[in-house]
Amino acid sequence: MMTRLFAFVSWGAVGASTVFWALRLGVEAPRAPSFTTPVGPAAAMRGDWSRVLGEPPQAAATDDGDADGAVEPASASRFRLFGVVAPKTPSDRDGVALIAVDDKPARAFRVGAVVDGQTVLRAVHRRGASLGPRDGTATVELELPALPPPATGALPPARAGAMPPPAPMPGMLPRPPAVAAPAPAPPAGDEPPSND
């Protein structure tokens, strides 16, 4: 009995191996389209990995070559505040603001992060955020738009019989109208007793 079991397991392994290698060798790898270009490992590593590793983005050098690093006046019209995550207790280093700069898509900035050029997010409070230079006072105050008032009102009073009957479900026959059943007739042979 053991010999038969051993032979069955051995031949099963040989068959599975044959099927595996036949499928492996008989299939071609998919070909890349003709318009693709191969990328070597040197080209793939050209990106800035500092943001992936957690370092805050570096401030870009100004094109006009200001040696003193003067901050251009920040205009409140360039920035738009979409939302804030402010701590319950006031703190200088906590909070995140969702800000769009120059009609670009909004991005999330932590307190102290560079928003644009030399402008950083200085503080976040419950309904707004303040921007300014890193070593100065806040020059721009952004506020969230006021929330619309809540919709209030009352439902009309319910009236008896005001609700329409439910519509029949598709595929079902409509219910026949209710017909009052006639009163049963008295038996023909029995006469009601008379009070004479």
Image: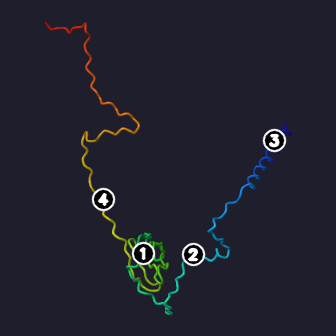
The Cα–Cα distance between marks 1 and 3, rounded to whole angstroms, is 72 Å
Kindly identify which numbered label has been placed on residue 8.
3
- The residue type indicated by label 2 comes to Arg
Q: Nearer the viewer, mark 1 or mark 2?
A: 1
Residue at point 66%, 71% (across, down):
38
- The residue type indicated by label 4 comes to Ala
Q: Nearer the viewer, residue 158 or 102?
A: 102
The Cα–Cα distance between marks 2 and 4, rounded to whole angstroms, is 44 Å
- The residue type indicated by label 1 comes to Asp
The Cα–Cα distance between marks 3 and 2, rounded to whole angstroms, is 58 Å
Kindly identify which numbered label has been placed on residue 51.
2
State which tag comes first along the sequence, 1 or 3: 3
Helix, strand or loop at disc 1? Answer: loop
Pointer 1 with pointer 4, Cβ within 8 A: no
* Res 167 quadrant in image: top left
- The residue type indicated by label 3 comes to Phe
User: Percent position (x, y) of residue 141?
Assistant: 38, 78
Instruction: Look at the picture and state if 107 lies above or below 157.
Output: below
State which tag comes first along the sequence, 3 or 2: 3
Query: Callout 4: few (<14), some (14-19), or many (20+) C-alpha neighbours within 10 Å?
Result: few
Residue placed under numbered mark 4 in the picture = 151
Kindly identify which numbered label has been placed on residue 103.
1
Query: Callout 2: few (<14), some (14-19), or many (20+) C-alpha neighbours within 10 Å?
Result: few
State which tag comes first along the sequence, 3 or 4: 3
